[in-house]
Amino acid sequence: MPEGDTVYLAAKNLRAALAGETLTRCDIRVPAFATVDLTGERVDEVVSRGKHLLMRVGDATIHTHLKMEGAWHVYRHGSAWRRPAWRARIILENAERVAVGFDLGIVEVVPRTAEAEVVGHLGPDLLGPDWDPDAAVANLAAQPDRAIGVAVLDQRNLAGLGNVYRSEVCFLRGVLPSRRVGDVSDLPGLVALAHRLIAANKDRHHRTTTGSLRRDPLWVYGRRGRPCLRCGTGIRTDEAFGEASSGGGSPGGGQERVVYWCPHCQT
């Protein structure tokens, strides 16, 4: 499930493979940008911003978003790709590496000076240098009647959380995702926990909130009908407060909107 930590790690890997190198191939397989060719340009930087990835190449920025199915892979020349070539949306090469973006939800090229047009609406980035917990708390508190499980997914409030962390953070704080923001007694504590969890996972390929990377890595997410790891009550799911998030955080609909919760541990 792509969340802010997934994108952070993707940016880290792409930065190691591409930053400081000149592109020898640029193949963008999206109609609106199919004629854009950045071959010969230098990749200056690759950074994540919430769930968005920005690759600064020459005077341009390649902006991508994984959505639900997307992934960036890095290969050596001649290595077999792990997904079919027809699913590639962008291919970038230098003398040593090939970076392929598969099934990306967004691929666009904007002037570097126009980055704010694609990510300027985002709230403080949980994994970014601009992380500001006080601003995140204030953003959440500004809409007290909103369900907390919806508010934390809104990327305008704080950038980086997805459905996994929404379910896990609410469980660990003992808060039903449907509870009004105004009725959450310790918003700063909830925000601090979200930051600790996503920061702890930012360099991992497998996410955990329980501390175990083998058995039961998550407290409630994906555990519908299974016993709660704390009290044994069956974990429930609900879509009633699965409102699609804003700011490119969720494509909306389907499984991504299902929230997991324990009816005994959360009130």
Image (tube, rainbow, N blue to C red):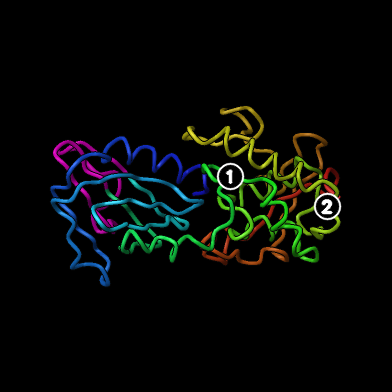
Residue 139: image location, x then y, percent: 69, 58
Residues marked 2 and 1 touching at CB (< 8 Å): no
> Who's the residue at 26% across and 41% down the image?
18
Q: Secondary structure at mark 1?
A: loop
Splitting the image into 4 quarters, where does residue 255 fall?
A: bottom right
Residue count near mark 2 (Cα–Cα under 10 Å), binned few <14, some 14–19, many ≥20: some
Residue at the spot of label 2: 184
Query: Is residue 144 positioned above or below 7 on the image?
Result: below
- From this viewpoint, which residue is outermost toward the front? 113
The mark closer to the camera, 2 or 1, is: 1
Q: Secondary structure at mark 2?
A: loop
Most foreground residue, 189 or 220: 189
Query: Is residue 145 positioned above or below 225 on the image?
Result: below
Mark 2: amino acid: Val
Which stretch is magenta? Answer: 73-99
Label 2, label 1: how far apart the Cα atoms are: 22 Å
Label total for image: 2
> Who's the residue at 27% across and 37% down the image?
17
Query: Which is more N-terminal, label 1 or label 2?
Result: 1
Residue at the spot of label 1: 131
Most foreground residue, 7 or 127: 127
Residue 181: image location, x then y, percent: 79, 58
> Who's the residue at 72% across and 60% down the image?
238
Residue count near mark 1 (Cα–Cα under 10 Å), binned few <14, some 14–19, many ≥20: some
Mark 1: amino acid: Trp
